[in-house]
Amino acid sequence: MRYNIKSMYNSSLPLCVTDFLGYLETIKGKSTNTIEAYKTDLIMFFRFLKIYKGISDDNLEFEDISINDIDEKFLVSITLTDLYAFISFAEKYRKNGNYARARKVATLKSFFKYLHSKAKIIDENPATELESPKINQRHPVYLTLNESKKLLASMNIKEKYYERDYCIITLFLNCGLRLSELCSINLSKIKGDTLSIVGKGNKERTVYLNKITLNAIENYLKVRDVSKVSDEDKDALFISSKNRRINKRSVERIVKKHIEVAGLDVEKYTPHKLRHTAATLMYKHGNVDIRSLQEILGHENISTTQIYTHVDDERLREAVSLNPLNDEIL
């Protein structure tokens, strides 16, 4: 799905922002979610600056501050100090943690780089020296092999949407799909044991389907009813109870429901955590190397995939325990 043009080009945004969002979509190929996140950050940034520089009505609520009057003169006046003031505001008043603030830094760096090197609006880039908060590497949250089996086994075969829901959970646990990728699956893109999907950054990749996944898809297709589905959505693999392509919110509810039935932590395990589970199980039990895992998950940078190497800790502990000297008492 492409970015909503009406949302991007509207009179409430400065021209420099709409042009930047258009650049992200057409040239950089950024995803809808990424563009929306950048847009949100920039709206907050310019509203803050109008307060910070004393050029907004004190009686206005923050969300009501207009930014469509931001012009080139205003952009040229922005300094590195202004940028740090905004990041401080995000921490103290918006309660943004390190990850949220790091995203805002990335937004500002990308935006001002565009203004400087592409749009040629500013002669100096104030974000060049802007530093990002230090982020401690987090271990991914995932289901163990036994918990994954428990989740699948706990699903009630007598439920109306059992085959569909079982297929959804199976795809998450075996293929490591993103939520948006699962919702966008088209039947026409399944060829034998391969599935072509458009992932993050609108990049197409091939996903290989194992036997259990193919079996789950086959069983679901036997009961999949598209008699009341519009022509626009008939190619969608997963159909909602409202007879259209299933959306992300519906899948989130489905996953939450079955996680709860299985007696697992509903607050802890989301569709994204099932993606983590697939990646961890492949790395830990399938001996998949990190480069192959990068391709499977559709990560642009290997550094993103390296969070799954935390499972090596168990292997290292086992290796040390197997040292022949471990049995010697001196």
Image (spheres, rainbow, N blue to C red):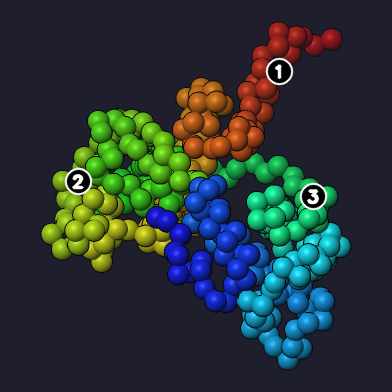
- Identify the image quadrant of the N terminus: bottom left
Above-or-below relation of 91 to 304: below
**Residue 20, position as x, y percentages in the image:** 60, 59
The part of the image, by quadrant, that contains residue 15 is: bottom right
The Cα atoms of the two marked residues, 3 and 1, are separated by: 46 Å
Q: Specify the amino acid type for callout 3.
A: Thr
Q: Residue at the spot x=31%, y=51% of the render?
A: 165
118 left or right of 186 in image? right
- Identify the image quadrant of the C terminus: top right
207 left or right of 87 in image? left
Q: Residue at the spot x=65%, y=80% of the render?
A: 66
Q: Specify the amino acid type for callout 1.
A: Val
Q: Specify the amino acid type for callout 2.
A: Leu
- First-in-chain label (2 vs 1): 2
Please tell me whether mark 2 sits on a helix, a strand or a loop: helix
Q: Are marks 2 and 1 in contact (CB under 8 Å)?
A: no
Viewer-side label of 2, 3: 3
Residue at image mark 2: 221
The part of the image, by quadrant, that contains residue 232 is: bottom left
Residue that sits furthest to the bottom in the current view: 59
